[in-house]
Amino acid sequence: MSRTAHITQVATIGVRVTDQQKAIDFYVGALGFEVRRDVPFGDGRWIEVAPPGAATTIALVPEGIPTGIRLSTRDADADHAALRAHGVDADAEVLRMGSAVPPMFGVRDPDGNSLFVIGSS
């Protein structure tokens, strides 16, 4: 089977947290992770943590932001078109939220699990 998309890595796993600061205290203070990203996002913050040297991060996701697996690609538009042409259950359009946020779209696997494909920023 040939590749339809050009996914480069499992980038981030989003987990729901009720208090982002308490979550940082746990992941950084107790587990020894480092904060990789902490930026304003909507009404809150987008925070990613990971063990030192790890490629995959954990996003500490507040209420209202979808949890799940986020995959990296070099070209979200090309992958979106290829996956839809291949019959994959993908969002109708690539989401664009301005220059600070890379283009992205959601896909669902045959069991309905959601994945997010995030373009290079």
Image (tube, grey):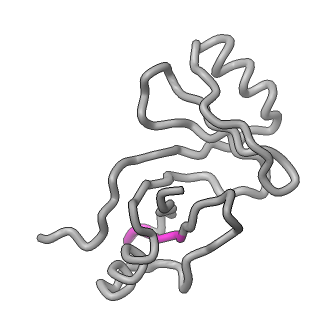
Q: Residue at x 33, y 88 (%)?
A: 85
Q: Point out residue 101 in the picture as x, y percentages from the top left corner.
A: 65, 59
Q: Decide whether residue 4 is among the magenta residues.
A: no
Q: Nearer the viewer, residue 103 or 24?
A: 103
Look at the picture and state if 117 lies above or below 55: below
Q: Point out residue 4 in the picture as x, y percentages from the top left corner.
A: 25, 73
Is residue 115 among what the camera can see? no
- Read off the magenta span: 105-111
Q: Is residue 91 left or right of residue 22?
A: left
Look at the picture and state if 86 lies above or below 100: below
Number of numbered labels in the structure image: 0
Q: Point out residue 120 in the picture as x, y percentages from the top left corner.
A: 48, 57
Q: Point out residue 55 in the picture as x, y percentages from the top left corner.
A: 42, 34
Farthest residue to the left: give it: 1
Q: Residue at x 60, y 21 (%)?
A: 34
Is residue 70 among what the camera can see? yes
Q: Nearer the viewer, residue 90 or 109?
A: 90
Farthest residue to the front: give it: 99
Rendered image quadrant of residue 56: top left
Farthest residue to the right: give it: 43
Q: Is residue 51 left or right of residue 9?
A: right
Rendered image quadrant of residue 2: bottom left
Q: Residue at x 55, y 53 (%)?
A: 68
Q: Residue at x 84, y 48 (%)?
A: 44
Q: Nearer the viewer, residue 103 or 109?
A: 103
Look at the picture and state if 114 lies above or below 15: below
Look at the picture and state if 73 lies above or below 15: below
Q: Is residue 67 left or right of residue 70?
A: right
Q: Is residue 5 left or right of residue 15?
A: left
The image quadrant where one finds the N terminus is bottom left
The image quadrant where one finds the C terminus is bottom right
